[in-house]
């Protein structure tokens, strides 16, 4: 049982490039979320999903897309990277809304 | 949507003293309140949680209290140790909605 697995752990991009951050969980959790955490800041919700085929926007969705074709996977796509998207990205999952949420180890992303 | 406010933003205590972190929430439908600890460079980890049908919960040196009427909940750490130094986040969630986090408290335990 690996929990929540994020890849890559580190990435450097140039402005305008696109990429996909991968997130997978093996706990059969319905709820999955993506957060970004800027230095000295809290966790801001980007997008979330309450089940396969269902996604919704969080607090800071602009510049990001998500899809949820399977229960296990919830990739986050940066459409055209900007320096303001330099951050640490955390994926998280939980069984249901009032159950403990588990985080992945994060992806540290730098946009030059 | 839900708004969670957390205070203080920084807290320094002497080793062995108690630490208290407070949060307020806005959505009366919220019924799940977890607390996370995040060490530098690591992922947030759940340390304790409470649901709306309970007023207090303890786990060794950590306790959480919930006042639904006033819409606030607090984390209490007793007999603090240097390894308690970290950033602590509170959060609130209504059952079918996203988990909203507070802005975090940097706790420093001084030896």
Image (cartoon, rainbow, N blue to C red):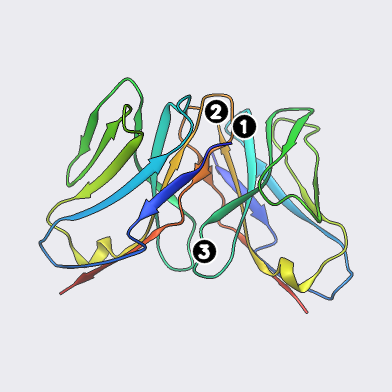
Neighbor class of circle 1 (other Cα within 10 Å; few <14, some 14-19, many 20+) is many
Instruction: Give the residue drawn at x 48%, y 62%.
Output: B42
- Residue B108 or residue A92, whichever sits in front: B108
Examine the rendered structure and indicate whether residue B12 appears above or below residue A72.
below
- Residue A22 or residue A18, whichever sits in front: A18
Direction from residue B9 to residue B74 in the image, left or right:
left
- Where residue B63 appears, as percent x and y from the top left, is 22, 41
Examine the rendered structure and indicate whether residue A81 appears above or below residue B91.
below
Direction from residue B109 to residue A48 in the image, left or right:
right
Q: What element carries label 2?
A: loop
Direction from residue B94 to residue A48 in the image, left or right:
right
- Where residue B93 appears, as percent x and y from the top left, is 49, 33
Neighbor class of circle 3 (other Cα within 10 Å; few <14, some 14-19, many 20+) is few
How far apart, in angstroms, are the residues tagged by discs 3 and 2?
26 Å
Q: What element carries label 1?
A: strand
- Where residue A32 appears, as percent x and y from the top left, is 64, 37
The residue most toward the bottom is: A112
Pointer 2 chain: A
Q: Are marks 2 and 1 in contact (CB under 8 Å)?
A: yes
How far apart, in angstroms, are the residues tagged by discs 3 and 1?
24 Å
* Label drawn at residue A41: 3
Q: Earlier in the sequence, mark 2 or mark 1?
A: 1
Foreground mark, 3 or 1? 3
Pointer 1 chain: A
How far apart, in angstroms, are the residues tagged by discs 2 and 1?
6 Å
Image quarter where the N terminus of chain B lies is top right
* Label drawn at residue A31: 1
Residue A39 figure quarter: bottom right
List the residue tagged with mark 2: A95
Residue A57 figure quarter: top right
């Amino acid at each position: 049982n690996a929990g929540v697995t994020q890849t890559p752990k580190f990435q450097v991009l140039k402005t305008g490039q696109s990429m996909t951050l991968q997130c997978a969980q093996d706990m059969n959790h319905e709820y999955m979320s993506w957060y970004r955490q800027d230095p000295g800041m809290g966790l801001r919700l980007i997008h979330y999903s309450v089940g396969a085929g269902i996604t919704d926007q969080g607090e800071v969705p602009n510049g990001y897309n998500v899809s949820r074709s399977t229960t296990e996977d919830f990739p986050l796509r940066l459409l055209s990277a900007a320096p303001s998207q330099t951050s640490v990205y955390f994926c998280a999952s939980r069984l249901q809304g009032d159950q403990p949420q588990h985080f992945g180890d994060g992806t540290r992303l730098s946009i030059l | 949507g839900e708004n969670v406010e957390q205070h203080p933003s920084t807290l320094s205590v002497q080793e062995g003293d108690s630490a208290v972190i407070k949060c307020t929430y806005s959505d009366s439908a919220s019924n799940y309140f977890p607390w996370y600890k995040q060490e530098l460079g690591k992922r947030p980890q759940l340390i304790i949680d409470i649901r709306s049908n309970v007023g207090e919960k303890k786990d060794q040196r950590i306790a959480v209290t919930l006042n639904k009427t006033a819409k606030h909940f607090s984390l209490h750490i007793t007999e603090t140790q240097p390894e308690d130094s970290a950033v602590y986040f509170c959060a609130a969630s209504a059952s079918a909605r996203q988990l909203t986090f507070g802005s975090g408290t940097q706790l420093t335990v001084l030896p």
